[in-house]
Image (cartoon, helix red, strand yellow):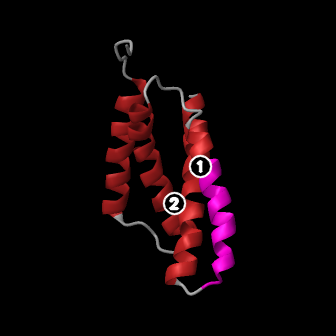
């Protein structure tokens, strides 16, 4: 369960960091938005390395489900667009996949 904590931090920081670039490049905000974006993306990368997985690819794959659900929460809370039933269904499917990857027994990595 420690991985879920780190995945949540990573998702918040990745989305926030990417949104800083979105704000600069798509919303016409100041280029100063890039600075907190870079800090946020650095924290994202550091947090993702804390996930309990023997292989980076498996950690990234499991993180994908958390990222998708966090993105839908961002859509709702920050952008004010309520996810529709298809968004919610997609999020459930992604979390199911993440759970299979993260919580299934895997043979020892060589």
Q: Residue at x 57, y 46 (%)?
A: 45
Tell me, yes or no, whether the highlighted magenta stretch contains residue 35.
yes
Camera-side residue of 23 and 68? 23
Residue 105 percent location from the top left of the image: 37, 17
Task: Specify the quadrant of the image occupied by residue 77.
Answer: bottom right
Q: Circle 1 sits in a helix, a strand or a loop, which is it?
A: helix
Q: Which mark is residue 44?
A: 1
Picture mark count? 2
Residue 48 percent location from the top left of the image: 55, 40
Q: Earlier in the sequence, mark 1 or mark 2?
A: 1
Q: Which residues are magenta?
A: 29-43
Residue under label 2: 73
Image position of 19 (left or right of 82)? right
Mark 1 → mark 2, Cα distance in angstroms: 17 Å
Residue 87 percent location from the top left of the image: 35, 61
Q: Residue at x 43, y 27 (%)?
A: 55
For residue 56, above or below residue 87 = above
Q: Residue at x 38, y 39 (%)?
A: 61
Q: Is residue 87 visible?
A: yes
Image position of 63 (left or right of 97)? right
For residue 18, above or below residue 4 = below
Q: Residues within 10 Å of mark 2 (few under 14, many from 20)?
A: some
Q: Residue at x 60, y 29 (%)?
A: 2
User: Decide: marks 1, 2 in contact (CB < 8 A)?
Assistant: no
Task: Specify the quadrant of the image occupied by residue 34.
Answer: bottom right
Q: Nearer the viewer, mark 1 or mark 2?
A: 1
Q: Which mark is residue 17?
A: none
Q: Main secondary structure of the magenta part?
A: helix
Location of the C terminus by quadrant is top left
Tell me, yes or no, whether the highlighted magenta stretch contains residue 110.
no
């Amino acid at each position: 369960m420690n991985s879920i904590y780190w995945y949540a931090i990573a998702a918040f920081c990745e989305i926030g960091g990417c949104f800083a670039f979105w704000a600069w490049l798509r919303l016409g905000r100041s280029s100063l938005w890039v600075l907190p974006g870079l800090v946020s993306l650095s924290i994202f990368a550091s947090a993702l390395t804390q996930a309990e997985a023997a292989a980076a690819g498996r950690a990234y794959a499991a993180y994908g489900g958390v990222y998708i659900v966090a993105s839908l929460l961002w859509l709702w809370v920050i952008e004010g667009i309520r996810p529709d039933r298809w968004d919610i269904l997609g999020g459930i499917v992604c979390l199911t996949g993440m759970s299979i990857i993260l919580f299934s027994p895997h043979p020892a990595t060589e």
